[in-house]
Amino acid sequence: MIAVDVMSGEKPPEVIIRGALKAVHELGVSVLLVGDKSVIENYLRKLRFINRLKVKIEHAKEVIGMHEIPTIACKKKRDASIIICAKLAGEGKVHGVFSPGNTGASLVASLMHIGRLEGVLRPGLATFVPNLRGASIVIDAGANLECTPDYLAQFAIMGEVFASKVQGKKNPSVGILSVGEEKSKGNELSMKTYDLLKDLDFNFVGNIEGYDIYDGNVDVVVCDGFVGNVVLKVTERVFKLTFEFVWQEIGYHLLQRIGFALGYPAIRKLNKKIDPREYGGAPLLGLNGIMIIGHGSSDEIATYNGIRIADIVYKNKVNRLITQRLEQFGFKKKPPPLEKEKI
Amino acid sequence: MIAVDVMSGEKPPEVIIRGALKAVHELGVSVLLVGDKSVIENYLRKLRFINRLKVKIEHAKEVIGMHEIPTIACKKKRDASIIICAKLAGEGKVHGVFSPGNTGASLVASLMHIGRLEGVLRPGLATFVPNLRGASIVIDAGANLECTPDYLAQFAIMGEVFASKVQGKKNPSVGILSVGEEKSKGNELSMKTYDLLKDLDFNFVGNIEGYDIYDGNVDVVVCDGFVGNVVLKVTERVFKLTFEFVWQEIGYHLLQRIGFALGYPAIRKLNKKIDPREYGGAPLLGLNGIMIIGHGSSDEIATYNGIRIADIVYKNKVNRLITQRLEQFGFKKKPPPLEKEKI
């Protein structure tokens, strides 16, 4: 059963619920809809048929908004939907969580109530990026704005497991995002991470450059959450702007306008390919449970895909393999508790 | 007179020389061609008419290659073209330098032989980025991979002067690249920089996100050189890949192929707009002289534009204004010498 936070996104709960029901119908998963019980029941009543064995409701009195400060909100709103989702996952009552809400709050709630896998220093947010050959992942996409080389090395290992078990890639390649391919190029963080990864028994390709992410030359791109977040936001806009730029250049030129119109189906297909909704959400890897964080604007499709990813992560035992790999690579010890876990 | 390093780029010296001569003819500047004297003279002889008053030659025995390690190469190759260019600028014998070579070597040579302006902690590389309304600049684009808030604050001030004096913008806006617009969002570096900039008497707009760079909402984007370099390389590729993606989606669909062909002139115009050659090169701001660093693949147009920028920076007294602004904002003291300056 996957818990779905239906309240925290920017879209109304109905949209998220529709996505959850689609997942029930098409994937056969069970879902637990977490949010205002009367709102959820009202909506379900409108529908002709609901499989009550596979669709449950858990009431949540409160919601954490997109612009609330995560640590403060998670401390104050003990009955918020995301907190309840995380608690249920921590108690093993659900297999995973999909939340389209405040990323920071999902992170804090996860640390407080799900906790980390053994040996994990910090969970890392893994985001899909489309490329010419399919999709690679960038980890960390924004959960950790200050990182150490150890964190990045663990992100590399967790990302590799994810690419292999969820995307089905054989021996996925892992690269560190830096400013040049040579080992000597980078900042202190990237160079020390290089030293940690270079002797591990996996497909480490060394440094990669900004150019390489979208070429699909590497399956797992490792960086700190500040860099990852900036890169993903820049590219999301650049893809869209390119067509605005072209349209601007076309101006009133009739033939070119016709050309644009004729080519538009391909542009639409591309927009679908690079649409974050198609990937559902970003898994927060390294938790002792499953948390998929969707875009704030997640709709029906995004919710469906987010639940789908949670289900694959669960069925393919990604977390067990992460623990094994970390142990294999010498990250055995239980790290000290984090500030956020103690809230 | 602008010194032009004709040897260090990826293109043959003839290409760079053609760009320099174009600048002589069209802008009326004088140039000093620095490189192998016989190669330069051979090429000039082939041409029918050269204004010998405006085109001089300075022999350089050596070249620093694109993949040499900057500090080592600058120490060993005392007669390299970029070293001679920097020395001439440091001695006041030329007004500025254009080099299409190894960025690191241009930086080290500049620090060794030109030195910093009074009060400048680190020079920052300012790069033009095209946007829907024209072009903004990103500073630092890769000269400083490890930064402190003080460096970033100075980059902001220098970038603002550049946007105002070279791009002719009135009261240019300055933003810090971060992961959210709120003051509280960012890493330690970005948040401390925010505190330094918030009370200065200029058009500081606070944090901006990756989305904003290409919208043209801000004139000067401030970040550390690691982030700046990654962002610029990612976007350079994403712009180009967008069309490859579209072509991939079109496949064998005839009407869409025709559409692509009809729209192609607009795509070509866009490619010209985002072409780094159109901007010539990135000025290294904060030096006690003028150094414009071109792309390694700089050709005739890039060289012409690089010299044009150097000329504008010189004529508009950008450096004098940078010193004034830094003093106005309390950066008066001579900072201690850098390791690289002592080589």
Image (spheres, coloured by chain):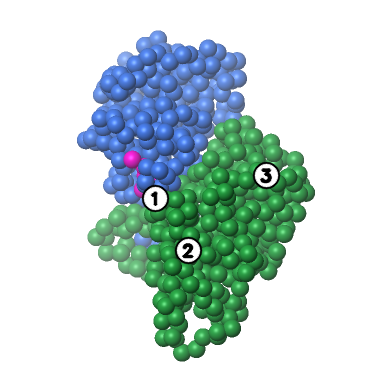
Chain colours: A blue, B green
How far is disc 3 from disc 1 in space, using C-alphas?
A: 36 Å
Q: Nearer the viewer, mark 3 or mark 1?
A: 3
Q: Which mark is residue B4?
A: none
Residue type highlighted by circle 1: Tyr
Query: Looking at the image, which is closer to me, B159 or B287?
Result: B287
How far is disc 2 from disc 3 in space, using C-alphas?
A: 29 Å
| 2 and 1 marks in contact (CB < 8 Å) | no
Residue identified by numbered label 1: A211
Residue B210 visible from this viewpoint: no
Instruction: Examine the rendered structure and indicate whether residue B261 appears above or below residue A110.
Output: below
Residue, x 57% and y 50% (percent of image)? B341
CA neighbours of label 3 inside 10 A, class few (<14), some (14 to 19), many (20+): some
Residue identified by numbered label 3: B335
Q: Are marks 2 and 3 on the same chain?
A: yes
Q: Which residues are magenta?
A: A206-212
Instruction: Indicate the quadrant where residue B186 lies.
Output: top right
Query: Looking at the image, which is closer to me, B222 or B169?
Result: B222
Relative image position of residue B305 (x, y in whole percent): 54, 69
Q: Nearer the viewer, mark 2 or mark 3?
A: 2
Q: Quadrant of the N terminus of chain B?
A: bottom right
